[in-house]
Amino acid sequence: MTHHTRHAALLLFCLLCACGGGGGTASSGTGAAAMSTPAAPTPPAPAPTLAEVGDRLFDETSLSASGKLACASCHVEARGHADAVGVFLPLGGLDGTHQGLRSSPSARYLDTAGAFGFDAQGRPRGGLFWDGRANSRTEQARGPLFNPDEMANADIPALAARLRALPYAADLRTAAGLPAAATDAQLVDAAVTALARYQADDAKFHPFTSKFDAVQDGSATFTAQEQRGLNLFNDPQRGNCASCHDSRPAPGQARALFTNFSYHALGVPRNTSQATRDPAFFDLGLCARSDLAGRADLCGAFRTPSLRNMALTAPYFHNASFATLEDVVAFYATRDLDPARWYPVTGGQAQLFNDLPPAYRANVQQGPPFRRTGQPPALSPQDMADVVAFLNTLTDGFSTATATH
């Protein structure tokens, strides 16, 4: 083969290679560009966080002995994370037939409640639940899981068995940094920590998206009626609501919580609609706690709830004795001026504070807006309507685009 012949053959070979000849796989492009780039490996999914697992646990009915009750059953998001509309506590217990005796308080805006204790003046403050017996969200989350009238787990091993049966049990262990062979106590601790972390981290439990917040931010204005209601709410001689339900931020806080986490005996009437209630039973609030059993002065006192989302959280008070916001405001304004409106009448006499034994009725709070017989009412019917109008501005989810004035 001559030099020119060898050169032509080599040129032909190169052309064939560049065009995918020689029996190889065809490709587009030429040279190095024709070579395919290996796909980058898919990164592993991020490990679930405790808050994300807690979100799932919050809705998990299989954690209850009856298989019917979850945290979300008593703390309904659409109702401000309080009782479902028209319901006083869903039935719980082993067989789903037990009726509890206290309404579900809202689970929102509790992050700064702090541990239960007494201030410099000896007044009780802080804690969670109506009687402040839980000092943290973790303690609060644990309570209903073992309450015989609620989720009714018999003990830690019983709850741990239910946790192990969850399809996402491995996610719980991973999020909590537990081994596959985690103990019963470790699993239960991880679950209540996850529930607490979910409520602490998720904005749904502290959204601050009410019209009140929009007004504070300058993006909305109150109606004339709402402004009158706020003025009455703050007036210490009229509504006096702000003395317990602070309408201004506490020191170190950016937003008003509408509670100072204090305790008061208000003398609310007995709820006679609770069909399973023992007529001899009285819920004594703080002094029913074993550690406060000797404090007769605390009998009948319950924690002051936040008024945020109050329009959503009926029924009201610890015993669910009022169904409407209008009745709540009217009770404060007329409790002592028109007691027959609120309490049973026997022999022509209203039985005041009938949800407390007589020995503790002196604990019931006096002072504005409560007025004694013969005094002028602190709030007129129009005033009461104005206060209700203001309270409706505390509902989360306000939008200037859909607001009506």
Image (cartoon, rainbow, N blue to C red):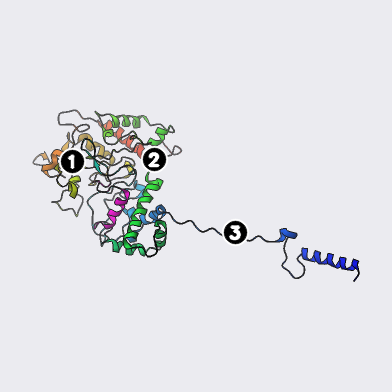
> Helix or strand or loop: what does disc 3 sit on?
loop
> In the image, what residue type sits under mark 2?
Phe
- Residue 170 location, quadrant: bottom left
**Range of magenta residues:** 127-152
- Residue 167 location, quadrant: bottom left
Q: Earlier in the sequence, mark 1 or mark 3?
A: 3
The x and y percentages for residue 249 are: 34, 34
The x and y percentages for residue 147 are: 25, 56
**Cα distance in 3D space between marks 3 and 2:** 43 Å
For the point 28% across and 51% down, the residue is: 87
Look at the image and tell me whether residue 29 can be seen: no
Q: Is residue 61 magenta?
A: no
Mark 2 neighbour density, 10 Å: few (under 14) some (14–19) many (20 or more): many
Look at the image and tell me whether residue 340 can be seen: yes
> In the image, what residue type sits under mark 1?
Gly
Query: In the rendered image, which residue does mark 2 sit on?
Result: 208
Query: In the rendered image, which residue does mark 3 sit on?
Result: 40
Horizontal relation, residue 23 to residue 166: left or right: right
Q: Earlier in the sequence, mark 3 or mark 2?
A: 3
> In the image, what residue type sits under mark 3?
Ala
**Dot in front, 3 or 2:** 3
The x and y percentages for residue 241 are: 27, 34
Pick the residue in front: 45 or 256: 45
Check contact, mark 1 vs mark 3: CB within 8 A.
no
Main secondary structure type of the part rendered in magenta: loop
Q: Is residue 206 above or below residue 165?
A: above
Query: In the rendered image, which residue does mark 1 sit on?
Result: 267
> Helix or strand or loop: what does disc 2 sit on?
loop
